[in-house]
Image (cartoon, coloured by chain):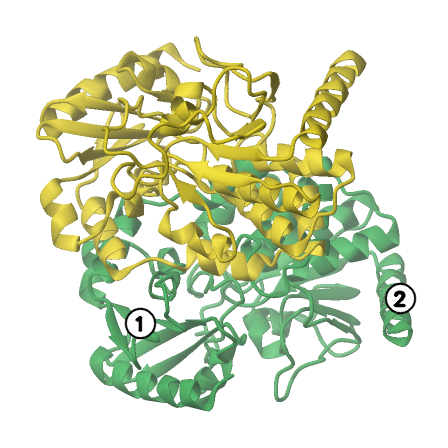
Chain colours: A yellow, B green
Amino acid sequence: MIKCFDKMKNTLKSIKRLIDRSSKTLLTSHIRLDGDALGSELALYYALKDLGKDPAIINDSPIPRVYKFLVREVPVREVKTAEASPPEPALESASGGEGADAGGGAVLSSSGKDKGFDLVISVDTPVKDRLGKVARLFSDPTPVINIDHHPPQADGGNFGTVNWVDTGKCSTGEMVYDLLRSAGWKITPRIAEALYVAIVTDTNRFTNPNTTSKTLRAAAHLIDCGADPTEIGNHLYKANTYGQLQLAARATETMKFFGGKRIATIWLTREMMKEARTPSIDTQDFPDIPASVEGVSVGVLLRELGEPNKVKVSLRSRDGVDVNRVAQKFGGGGHKGAAGCELQGTIEEVQGVVVKEIEKALEEGP
Amino acid sequence: MIKCFDKMKNTLKSIKRLIDRSSKTLLTSHIRLDGDALGSELALYYALKDLGKDPAIINDSPIPRVYKFLVREVPVREVKTAEASPPEPALESASGGEGADAGGGAVLSSSGKDKGFDLVISVDTPVKDRLGKVARLFSDPTPVINIDHHPPQADGGNFGTVNWVDTGKCSTGEMVYDLLRSAGWKITPRIAEALYVAIVTDTNRFTNPNTTSKTLRAAAHLIDCGADPTEIGNHLYKANTYGQLQLAARATETMKFFGGKRIATIWLTREMMKEARTPSIDTQDFPDIPASVEGVSVGVLLRELGEPNKVKVSLRSRDGVDVNRVAQKFGGGGHKGAAGCELQGTIEEVQGVVVKEIEKALEEGP
């Protein structure tokens, strides 16, 4: 335990040293941004600004609508090229968010690598590939700080010069909070707000496993530093659109049960999405609907993608069922409690295949 | 400020003295129990048991389904008589819960008053009337401790021998937590769980106004004392029934907007309730659906009651709009942000009348 603590202390020291030495830092995170990714980036952006540095946030994906209130003052940029995005592994975040669909928009840099960044900080991203096109903006000699709480990936993990990966943490936001505290950097109101959003979203409102008393104490301190839990709650949880709610209602009406009622599925057809005029980003919390039924261990959202016969599957579990393993069987992944994958087939075919695999996982037990 | 603090210290001392002297305490709370009422009662029950006392919890209303996990070991009793309940003022709790509909069941005591209680502790209840039939179980000489965070009522408030009413607190649970801490009584795991439920439900998951850093620090300490936020979250927020979700979907489809889209209404007809085979208690969070729409200041749920042409109206607001004032105009009440009332008329007539009154309130401003 003491050894572990010492190791972390040394890691934090190395991170602080790299930041102290740098002047132009690239802050980035995974494709399909979520609250933890964006909140952690923003907190570091403000902290570096306050230290007199010149940081820039560049992501592969746009900022989801509900998080736009966070970036009132910050130019968060998005890499967009004429090229297609690399194939995405369709991983899912712990909070259940898929973030926005990537692609489209203006070119920020198509050549990359020569932007003059002397440090890269990647947050909330388990493999470099998940940075999407941003990964092309920096080359090997540039030091990379990798701060993340996701479980290690089979390969491509620990891609940083310094890797601070703590799977025991509820969110990357809590880690950034710890970093700021240990470095003695001031937590200003805007840093507090960004970190509160990171923590509250990735813990699914302080309920996901890994939510500890330390998490709530960090949140309490962030309130003291200026985060307003009521205002943040209004932005995050009272910002539904009419179309989104109607679509949720229609999706709820497709609910079916399998595996002795331990599996519940809902689905969204392209037709339904079109009718409700609702972008897929606004369906990010829909997997929580089947997962919220009493007695259900795995909730499933099946969503038809733009490409014909391709279905995005989002899985949510409790009772220790590992849906990451299920998703990985179909080339996807994520967390134990929240994972995703994409499959070829009609929505009913995909439902059949996925349910079968979940039934196996339930039989095997946690 | 110091004066205020001294006053509270004296109040807490008086409360502790009354408890120390008593041996048989009646713990009770308002009709239509919610999480704050039940959690606060239970915490006190366990604390008094641990002190060697002989407490009893008796309420007018049954325990709502989602809270039943809390009372595994405790005989929470319910006063039920053949008589009808007194007319209910249809007040609403801060959390938006209505609790269960009262009535029915076995008689615990029809005579009352002679149960031998030497102390009554009422929690979360602004007027004695709101205790329902339990108010008849004790007579004037019995000392009453009144612990509450609701705004004072026009009359009938401060009905205790000692009144500890703090409208600045997010929940009665947080007050009971403060009492236990100030008295130096041990917070056991079951006390921690009960108080966590009280706080998390009455703050609407740490987002309602009055949620402070102290609230989150109390929650953190309760986790240290044995409350499990993930398990509690599963019980409270992942315990929907199929019928409940289908009913929510159908209610969502009735959504209408008024007052420049600042008011959103949904409704539930008797027919819809019957078809979904869902008790009214399971619709307690439905007013949050219209209130969750971006830009909406007041969300309204209209629900047909058993009695023909009688409609229960539940109001939720933000942006400082005082729906308590609106509800009071129709003989109801509650909090500034969550209130309710009952009106005669068809569901459409009631919608018209209530919307008109809300529009006036919006024009007047907060």
Q: Choose between B106 and A297: the one closer to the eye.
A: A297
What amino acid type should be assigned to the residue bearing mark 2?
Lys
Tell which subunit mark 2 falls on. B
Both marks 2 and 1 on one chain? yes
In the structure shown, which secondary structural element does the residue marked by tag 1 occupy? strand
Q: Which residue is mark 1?
A: B264
Residue A91, position as x, y percentages in the image = 36, 25
Which of pointers 2 and 1 lies earlier in the amino acid sequence?
A: 2
What amino acid type should be assigned to the residue bearing mark 1?
Ala
The image quadrant of residue A347 is top left
Q: Is disc 1 surrounded by few (<14), some (14 to 19) or many (20+) residues within 10 Å? A: many
What label does residue A268 carry, if any? Answer: none
In the rendered image, the vertical position of residue A133 relative to residue B288, given as above or below:
above
Residue A124, position as x, y percentages in the image = 51, 29
Alpha-carbon span between mark 2 and mark 1: 44 Å
| Residue drawn at x 26%, y 85% as measured from the top left | B352
In the structure shown, which secondary structural element does the residue marked by tag 2 occupy? helix
Residue B159, position as x, y percentages in the image = 71, 79
What label does residue B9 carry, if any? Answer: 2
Quadrant, the C terminus of chain A: top left
Q: Choose between A115 and B305: the one closer to the eye.
A: A115
Q: Are marks 2 and 1 in contact (CB under 8 Å)?
A: no
Residue B207, position as x, y percentages in the image = 55, 57
Tag count? 2
